[in-house]
Image (cartoon, rainbow, N blue to C red):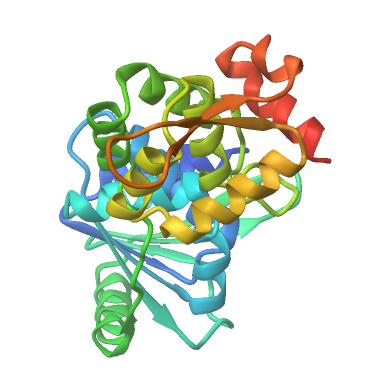
Amino acid sequence: MTSNLLDSKLDDILSRVLSNADGEVIAVNPSAGAIESLVRVATDFDGDLPSVRLLAEERTLKDVMDDFIVASNAADLIDADVLTLRTTADGGQNSLLVTEDSVVALVDAGSQVGGLTADDDGFVDAAYDTYDTQWDEADEFHLRTPPITRVRETLADEISADAEADFTTILDSLETARGDGDGLDEVTISLLVAAKNEALLYDISKWGEDVGIASKATFSRTKTKLEDMGLIDTEKVPIDVGRPRLRLKLGDDRLRDAESDELASAATSLLA
């Protein structure tokens, strides 16, 4: 790779670097946006991915991975042994993509993003050795979010195929899943899906805890909030032994009438 990559979209630069990389890529000090783009491009990549070592500030990684959509896809890549994450305390470094053949500096020029490329053998070897050493000395970043593939497979198995399809459609309709005003969080989405499919609170909360989304207590608290705000209703279902369990139902006509790809926007409006 000898030419500079003067593309307007960061995704295009990352895709070209991954396509041309022999061996592995070390992503050094990427911005939050670059981490999101890298996960997105790697997830959608058509072909054999090189292994990616991502070295970023811990605060930046935590902020990015608060988004369930990004984190669950990153967890998929980690599970596939494609991506590894470590943290650096030096946030003043340039944002680089280092391969065995080139060093690409990512430069944000406002309306355009550029990848300034160096491929001099001596320079590339020195840079690779430098960041390989930094990697060895860096701390591992432990991502607690479960892989999205596992989430979907277990949801289909333990709740229903329709619930999994609704969950996937809702995620696809969202830009983020943080629950901080910029999108619904994964627990709220799970409960809305369960209510749409009239699943039991016990079943969806047990699934959510087992797969690693959140504890049963978190599901219970979120259910209470959504019920208080009128988004979901519950009805008691008698069981042979013990207290009746609660069946979840959508509690507002705007939610009941919404298609799966409209459910998130309708719920967000009601929560505002």
> Is residue 227 visible to us here?
yes
> Is residue 67 visible to us here?
no
Q: Which residue lies furthest to the right in this view?
A: 272
Q: In this view, does 206 lie to the left or right of 31?
A: left
Q: Is residue 72 left or right of residue 115?
A: left
Q: In this view, does 133 lie above or below 201?
A: below
Q: In which quarter of the image is the C terminus?
A: top right
Residue drawn at point x = 33 percent, y = 86 percent: 138
- Frontmost residue, 172 versus 28: 172
Image coordinates of residue 83 in percent, x first then y, are 27, 57
- Frontmost residue, 39 versus 63: 63
Residue drawn at point x = 48 percent, y = 38 percent: 190
Q: Residue 98 lies in what quarter of the image?
A: bottom left
Residue drawn at point x = 68 percent, y = 41 percent: 226
Image label count: 0
- Frontmost residue, 192 versus 251: 251
Q: Residue furthest front?
A: 241
Q: In this view, does 148 lie to the left or right of 81?
A: right
Image coordinates of residue 188 in percent, x first then y, are 58, 42
Q: Is residue 162 above or below residue 11?
A: above
Q: Residue 237 lies in what quarter of the image?
A: top left
Image coordinates of residue 11 in percent, x first then y, are 50, 40
Q: Residue 46 lies in what quarter of the image?
A: top left
Residue drawn at point x = 27 percent, y = 43 percent: 20
- Frontmost residue, 100 versus 1: 100
Image coordinates of residue 180 in percent, x first then y, are 70, 54
Q: In this view, does 45 lie above or below 67?
A: above
